[in-house]
Amino acid sequence: MTAVEQTTTPAASTSNRVHDRRPVTVRDTPRVLSIAGTDPTGGAGIQADLKSIAANGGYGMAVVTALVAQNTRGVRSVHTPPVGFLREQLHAVADDVVIDAVKIGMLGDVAIIDAVSTWLQETVTGPVVLDPVMVATSGDRLLRRDAEAAMRALLPHVDLVTPNLPELAVLADEPVATSWADALAQAERVSAQAGVIVLVKGGHLTGTTACPDALVDATGGLGGDRSLIEFDGLRVDTRNTHGTGCSLSSAMATLVARSGSWTEALGDAKTWLTSSLRHADALEVGSGNGPINHFAELWVSSGMTSGRQDGAGILSGWWEDIAEVRTRIDRLPFVTTLADGTLDPARFAWYLQQDAIYLRAYSRVLARASALAPTAEEQVFWATGAAGSIEAEMELHRTWLRTYAVSGMEVEPSATTTAYLDHLHAATVDGDYGRVVAAVLPCYWIYQDLGERLVGASHAEHPFAAWLDTYADPAFATANARAIEIVAGAVARANETGRDTMRRAFLASAAHEEAFFAEPIR
Ligand SMILES: Nc1ncnc2c1ncn2[C@@H]1O[C@H](COP(=O)(O)OP(=O)(O)OP(=O)(O)O)[C@@H](O)[C@H]1O
Ligand SMILES: Cc1ncc(COP(=O)(O)O)c(N)n1
């Protein structure tokens, strides 16, 4: 294979740090070394690192710091080989192989930290990512408390550090941040002190459906002189998050060595990690906090995954297929200004009018689904949805449009609304139940998914609080879950052609959803 090599300096440093940030030699398949502890169940530590490096396009190598008897439920014991043997492993790799990037995980104690630090300074020229592993998800300590100061002293010798919120607090020698804004400020202090880029991780934030991450570089070296770049993310509803920190840091080491950009690396790593979390439950590994599914995307795209054989698995694949559409919807000006309250009321009124037109027609399409339903229960479900949809349309006229609509405003369906409705009507023409229900599903699912985040933005003084609060209706969440189940059942019954028709109807509706939310503010 051809390796594309080019040397870049991803972030120029101007601080009084011990070393300048290491340059990156960009390669198609970087040779990435993980220095970390083990997890015999394969979800965290070196085993996760090797999977993550491979999944992100690197060649993985591994030097073991400690052997950990652990599983998805917790850590049982740790065996640490003599530190001299650790040095032998490090030298064995470096004497033979060019190391394009290093990821450091569990270090355990002061002697190991010192040995790795010395080796880094003497040997490594490529980028170094440090995951300052201190406590496992299970609550077991993986770093001796008396080694925390040595961990802080290691920071100036690495390029990127990836602490979770409790680890960030230890590195800053401060209490744990209780808000995202506090965490970013704390990261700025760590970055300024040690001259290191900090990847702040939002996995431990509580009371939110968001899961943001951010890069903080006090020297302003993130491109365009920026010192902060944030990536919003959605929290995946799973308990199988064992090894996410290990996997993210190895992905960062691999991706920065492929692109030369920390920012690009985090964007790509987060997309991959979120997808690996979404497919985590399908692995069914262990009874505690199970691992993420590192290769899910590759398995799905090569048709190898068995999860796609059942209806629910296929549907979660479609949901994955529209991940980018969903991310774009989240970032649309109409959505962001509705969330922060700065939305122009005239634009809101225009949206409501189009929504009313949509709901009237959508009700008829749901009635068609009811007419085609194979069981009485499904017939009732869609008929109830049809009634709810037309009632919602009438309610819009009774209340919201009275408040917001300005007389003389355009009430014709826009081209975007017309295109969406034409697509839904077309899905009903051949009496194919699967096609109709696949076409109507994105309206349920995307509305519910987006609504969960919009509810979080509501507060007593919010100008659109009354509207945002409507998204909190638990009945809608229940209806959405049932709609997903019904469509999964229809997928399971369909043959390959039928599934393909359903998938195309689903994807097209998702694209129409995006256009619908984009249209009020262009
Ligand atoms: N439920 C989730 N949904 C989506 N992303 C998540 C979720 N949990 C964690 N992440 C992401 O996983 C990465 C690791 O975050 P976290 O804050 O959990 O670090 P950690 O505690 O070091 O991980 P670990 O679970 O390996 O100890 C971050 O990118 C975070 O945004
Ligand atoms: C060897 C090793 N390294 C790191 C972790 C942290 O991972 P998690 O916090 O997900 O348990 C772990 N459990 N084991």
Image: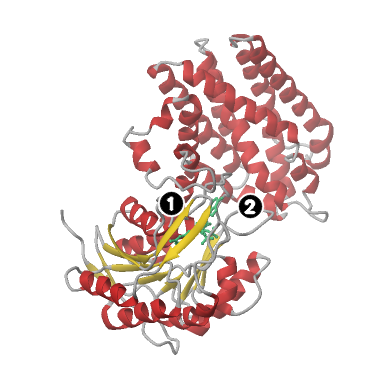
Say the numbered circle drawn on residue 259.
none
Are discs 2 and 1 less than 8 Å apart at CB? Answer: no
Mark 2 near ligand 1 (CB under 8 Å)?
A: no
Q: Quadrant of residue 436?
A: top right
Left or right of 35 in this view: 411: right
CA neighbours of label 2 inside 10 A, class few (<14), some (14 to 19), many (20+): some
Question: In the image, residue 171 lies at what x, y percent?
Answer: 54, 77
Applied colour scheme: secondary structure
Say if residue 86 shows up in the picture: yes
Residue 368 vs residue 115, the one in the foreground: 115
Residue at the image point whose x is 32% and y is 62% from the top: 259
Amino acid on which the number 2 mark rests in the picture? Thr
Q: Nearer the viewer, residue 372 or 90?
A: 90
Residue located beneath label 1 in the image: 43
Mark nearer the N terminus (2 vs 1): 1
Quickly name the residue at label 2.
336
The nearer-to-camera label among 2 and 1 is 1
Residue at x 60%, y 11% (from the top left corner)? 373
Measure how far apart labels 2 and 1 are at the Cα level: 36 Å
For residue 298, side relative to residue 407 (left or right): left
Q: Position of residue 357 (x, y in %)?
A: 68, 28
In the rendered view, would you say 318 is above or below 383? below
Q: Is mark 1 within 8 Å of ligand 2?
A: yes
Where residue 238 appears, as percent x and y from the top left, is 56, 44
Label 1 packing within 10 angstroms: few (<14), some (14-19), many (20+): many
Residue 188 shows in this picture: no
Q: Amino acid at mark 1?
A: Gly
**Residue at position x 55%, y 70% in the image:** 167
| Residue at image point 45% right, 16% down | 494
Where residue 503 appears, as percent x and y from the top left, is 45, 26
